[in-house]
Image (cartoon, grey):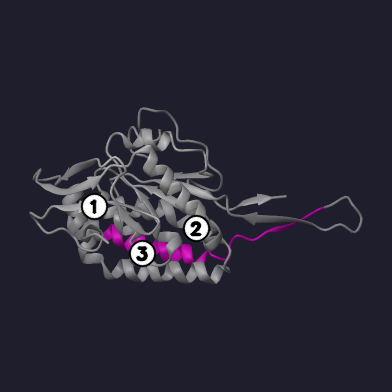
Amino acid sequence: MSATETEAPMSGAVRTSDLLIAGEYVAAKDGRYYETTEALTGGPIARVAAASADDVNLAVDAAAAALAEWSSPPPAVRRAVLERAAVLLGERTGDIVATMSREMGATLPWCGFNVHVAKGMLVEAAAQAYAAVGEVIASDVPGLTALGVRQPVGVVVGIAPWNAPLILGVRAVVWPLVWGNTVVLKSSGQTPLTQAATVSPASASPSIRSRRIRGGRESPTAMATVRPTGSGISTVPEPGVGGGGGGPDGPAPAMRGRGVSPRARGDR
């Protein structure tokens, strides 16, 4: 585990932050890094691994491999994991607030608000673990009972912007997770250390912790060229990343489910 994801960088410190894939921190396959700087001073914060299409494919494969492990247990297991993640996120409030303030130049109260809302999202998502219920469907066949069964869609890609980095990072992953999907998170190039807290290895299980990618300006291309294994998109994209969200590339891609977070689909 690198120090980037467990400690807030103090003023003047420059960290190396690698990709998190299959539960391990790894450098990008092509060895590329980019540097992030403080929004207010321009001083360096971190040297961050930039994901390529090959790295994205590795993350998607890891998420696909973890799908059965995460989706098969009863809802109580996912609920307990997300409740624990909320507790651990709260314990790291000071570190996260300090890091977020450096990365985005925000005031400390705004950064603290991000942590407060993100914790609430985790708690609320945990409470929704039993909400993916099916339904009985009217049938014209005598003696036949027809049922609608909800099931995870599979691997979901989450894209989170910089302007409320912890709130939007958590939102991109937590709703697909609670209904049994696995998630690959593409974090913002401006706030990668803050969004590392979204999928910290300490946060619970291999199904949550195993996949996060990051990149600079090349990262949208990497996401666009990934093999078509992903089954859904959960996103509030930055300009130039995935379209929509005020960016130049048009509306956000179509999504299943309510709002921007794909829910378990109903197969009949």
> Who comes first in sequence, dot 3 or dot 2?
2
Question: What is the three-letter code of the residue carrying label 2?
Answer: Ala
Residue 144: % across, % down: 86, 57
Indicate the secondary structure of the residue bearing disc 2: helix
Residue 210: % across, % down: 40, 57
Q: Which mark is residue 33?
A: none
Residue at image mark 2: 66
Q: Is residue 188 left or right of residue 211?
A: left
Q: Label 1 crowding class (10 Å Cα cut-off): few <14, some 14-19, many 20+? A: many
Residue 209: % across, % down: 39, 60
Question: What is the three-letter code of the residue carrying label 3?
Answer: Lys
Residue at image mark 3: 119
Residue at image mark 1: 17
What's the CA distance linking mark 1 and mark 3? 24 Å
Question: What is the three-letter code of the residue carrying label 1?
Answer: Ser
Q: Is residue 40 left or right of residue 200?
A: left
Indicate the secondary structure of the residue bearing disc 1: strand
- Residue at the right extreme of this rendering: 142
Q: Label 2 crowding class (10 Å Cα cut-off): few <14, some 14-19, many 20+? A: many
Question: What stretch of residues is rendered in magenta?
Answer: 113-138
Q: Label 3 crowding class (10 Å Cα cut-off): few <14, some 14-19, many 20+? A: many
Q: Work out whether residue 32 or residue 140 is closer to the camera in this orientation and state it.
A: 32
Q: Work out whether residue 61 or residue 125 is closer to the camera in this orientation and state it.
A: 61
Residue 200 occupies quadrant: bottom left
> Who comes first in sequence, dot 1 or dot 3?
1
Is 124 above or below relative to 242?
A: below
Q: Assess whether residue 117 is covered by the magenta stretch.
A: yes
Locate the N terminus by quadrant: bottom left
